[in-house]
Amino acid sequence: MTDGTSIGPRLKPILAQRQDDVDKAKAKRSIGGLTGAIGEAPMTRGFLAGLYEYYAKHGKPGIIADIRGSSPVSKSTRSRLDVMDMAEDYRDAGAAAVSASPDRRFFRGSIADLATAKASNLPILANDIVVDLYQVYEARYAGADASLLIASILGDQLKEFVARAQSIALDPLVEVRNEAELAMALEAGANLIAVNNRDLETLEVDPTVCERLLPKIPQDSVLAIASGGIKTQEDIEKVAALGAKAVRVATVLLEAKDPYLALHQLLGTTPPDEDAEG
């Protein structure tokens, strides 16, 4: 963990706890056992291909809509959570993909949430704080189509994690916040890169991060994603102009009374029942 942003005092205990959770999971099922099971699992849906397809069809960034009860890297929470209902609502409202978390301790999710979210028939991103290759294999086994890899956490291990994910048909989504991490992601062979405006240590959102980094992502070989503080149609239009072909959205949906309507509002569309009434 040497080439990215240094790990601060807020994240260090979270990473240690996540590693401890993974070590306990390994004691129950080895990575070898997971690898064998993956060989018999259904093929992934194609997260990267799905985002490209959405962009080609609609000419604007697709929304990766988040499902989780809480997060260690955000202040948003949701007290009631029905993963299947939310996934289907996101699909019906027009999401391009869905993210769900296998982690119970920090995200109030579960490994089963990945399979449950597949009821939406949308590509699924495993939203986790990955510290061990085991999590990549576990996400693939559980039904994810992509896995979030945070450059600042993995550092010089990033290239291996990207290669391992790709080897099991799991699209690695590499998250970056500065030029050094972007260079590392490109060197690792990532073709799906998310620029996060949110500082994982302070939780503060700085839109200039996307403004600075998105134009530096090679459009011919990488699909660029914007995340962190995306709350309005105007926000999406701004990052689209900078080169984003997809956006990750969490807070505005999780804090909404009705995430289905909130997603329609973000997309600038009207729910079918309102069309009928109008």
Image: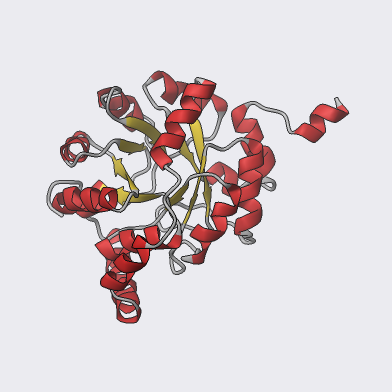
Residue at point 34%, 38% (across, down): 194
Q: Nearer the viewer, residue 274 or 152?
A: 274
In terms of image quadrants, where is residue 259? top right
Across the whole image, how many numbered discs are drawn on residues? 0
Residue at point 29%, 26% (across, down): 212
Residue at point 77%, 32% (across, down): 272
Q: Quadrant of the N terminus?
A: bottom left
The answer to whether residue 1 is left or right of residue 63 is: left
Q: Position of residue 103 (x, y in %)?
A: 43, 65
Q: Nearer the viewer, residue 248 or 9?
A: 248
Q: Nearer the viewer, residue 188 or 203?
A: 188
Residue at point 37%, 42% (across, down): 198
- Above or below: residue 224 compared with residue 154: above
The answer to whether residue 6 of the structure is visible from this angle is: no
- Above or below: residue 211 compared with residue 117: above
- Above or below: residue 267 compared with residue 111: above
The answer to whether residue 212 is left or right of residue 253 is: left
Q: Position of residue 215 (x, y in %)?
A: 29, 22
The answer to whether residue 91 of the structure is visible from this angle is: yes
